[in-house]
Amino acid sequence: MDSRQALIDHSITFLQEIKDMTPGAEMERWLNTISGPQSALYADLARLIKSGVAEGWAARDEVGGPHYRRGLILGPTPETFYFSMMAVYMNSRDARAFDDGDGVLRGARHGHPYGEVNLVVPIDEGAELKGLQGWQGAGWTAPDPGSWHHPEVRGGALISLTYLPAGRVSFDVKPPA
């Protein structure tokens, strides 16, 4: 079995477990406790998404150059309980256009109509993704339904394996007035 299919198969098992949960702070704490970096699930998903980036089938589409890439792995299907899977690669050490000079790479602003669930996989030791609950190294973030943000990374390169309920993400969301 290739690494892409193995990632999808492992993800389906994970999605079976979370399919009726609502993303948010409570889910994020639960994921980091039950399926954090110490778990076999985290280790398997992290290994497979790293393989996908290295093999070129994950996070292949440049958003702001090679330091900020994303790509759809699989759209929502009945087998994934209508979650889609996306990979995002960000490297704050090569931030260029998206860096305000503070060493933080800010990505494209987007909204989460139904929330999202992110497996955070640092490539560089100390790399972190800013979640709605604060900075997160290896582990999980779970932004609430209706939330929006600029993804931010500091401390180097990481991959976010993102699960989107109903495949929904909005890149044209307007911030509240």
Image: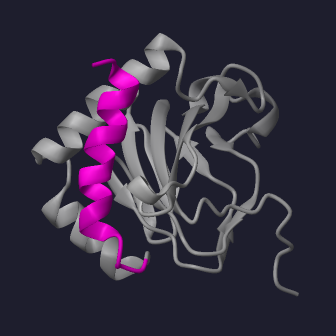
What residue lies at 69% left-to-right and 29% top-to-bottom? 95
Q: Is residue 28 visible?
A: yes
Q: Is residue 32 left or right of residue 110?
A: left
Image location of residue 53, percent across then percent down: 48, 21
Q: Point out the image quarter for the N terminus.
A: top left
Q: Is residue 28 left or right of residue 60?
A: left
Vertical side of 14 occupied by 125: above or below? above
What residue lies at 86% left-to-right and 62% top-to-bottom? 172
Q: Is residue 42 left or right of residue 144?
A: left
Furthest-top residue in view? 55
Vertical side of 160 occupied by 7: above or below? above
As rendered, which of 57 and 135 lies closer to the eye? 57
Numbered range of the magenta stretch: 1-22
Image location of residue 136, percent across then percent down: 39, 54
Q: Point out the image quarter for the C terminus.
A: bottom right
Q: Is residue 42 left or right of residue 102?
A: left
Query: Does the magenta stretch mainly form a helix, a strand or a loop?
Result: helix
Q: Is residue 126 magenta?
A: no
Image location of residue 72, percent across then percent down: 61, 39
As rendered, which of 18 and 38 lies closer to the eye? 18
Q: How is the image coloured?
A: one colour
What residue lies at 29% left-to-right and 30% top-to-bottom? 6
Picture quadrant of residue 27: bottom left
What residue lies at 26% left-to-right and 55% top-to-bottom? 14
Image location of residue 167, percent across then percent down: 60, 59
As rendered, which of 86 and 84 lies closer to the eye? 84
Furthest-bottom residue in view? 177
Q: Is residue 126 visible?
A: no
Furthest-front residue in view? 78
Vertical side of 26 occupied by 2: above or below? above
